[in-house]
Amino acid sequence: MLGEALWAQRGAYDRGASSAAEYWGAVAGAVGIEQLSEDEISEVQRADDRYFLRLDPAARSLIHDLARNQVRLALLSNASESFGAAVRRADWFEAFTLAVISGEERAVKPGREIFEVLLDVLAHETGECRSPRRSSSSMIARRTSTPRRRSASTPICGRATAMSTPRAPSTVR
C-alpha cells in the first residue's frame, strides 16, 4: 500500500508539478494519515533523498576512477527539486561536472525537452554554440518557478546556467 502510494504521485513530483508538501501529503493520505507537519515532511523527504543517494561501492569506485582520469561526468535524473539539492551535497557528486534534475527543469525523461536542456548545458560548459531544435525552452533555474523562454532561432552560446555545478576533477580522491 505504501509502495503504491509513493509511486502514484511520483511522476508529478519528479516533474516539478507538485511541491514536497503536496506529494508527501498525498502519500500520507493514501495510507490513512490525515496531515503531516512541516517537520514530518522534511523528515520523510530526507529519508527519500538518503534512499536515492545510496551508491553501490563498485559504482562509487567507478565514478571516482573516471573522474581521476579526467572523464567529465554529468548526472541526468528524473527526481524532485529536493533531490537535486541533496545530490549536489553528496560526497560522491564531487566527481560530476554538472547535474540536470527533472524537478528543476519541469521536464522528464524520456521526453525530448530534458535532453535538450542537457545538451544546452553541455554546450555552455564546452564553450560551443548550439541552435535549439525546438520552438521554445522551459529551462528553469534551480528553485525558480518562472520559465525562461527563447526563440528557436536564438543560438545558445556562452550563457551561464544554474543547472551547471562545476567540479574540478582534481578534488576527487
Image (tube, grey):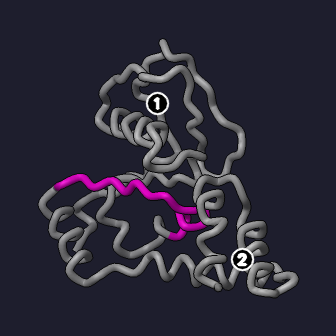
Q: What stretch is highlighted in magenta?
A: 71-86
Q: Position of residue 52 (x, y in %)?
A: 46, 76
The residue depicted at 77 percent of the width and 84 percent of the height is 39
Q: Distance between the residues labelled 2 and 1?
A: 39 Å
| Image quadrant where one finds the C terminus | bottom left
| Image quadrant where one finds the N terminus | bottom right
At label 1, counting other C-alpha atoms closer than 10 Å, the crowd grade (few under 14, some 14-19, many 20 or more) is: few
The residue depicted at 29 percent of the width and 64 percent of the height is 95
Q: Is residue 26 magenta?
A: no
Q: Name the residue beneath numbered marker 1.
A: 159
Who is closer to the viewer here, 168 or 131? 131
Who is closer to the viewer here, 3 or 24? 3
Secondary structure category for the residue under label 1? loop
Q: Is residue 78 magenta?
A: yes
Q: Position of residue 172 (x, y in %)?
A: 25, 69
Q: Position of residue 91 (x, y in %)?
A: 38, 75
The residue depicted at 30 percent of the width and 27 percent of the height is 128
The amino acid pointed to by label 2 is Val
Q: Name the residue beneath numbered marker 2.
A: 27
Compared to 71, does 46 lie above or below?
below
Compared to 99, does 2 lie above or below?
below
Who is closer to the viewer here, 18 or 84? 18
Who is closer to the viewer here, 91 or 40? 40
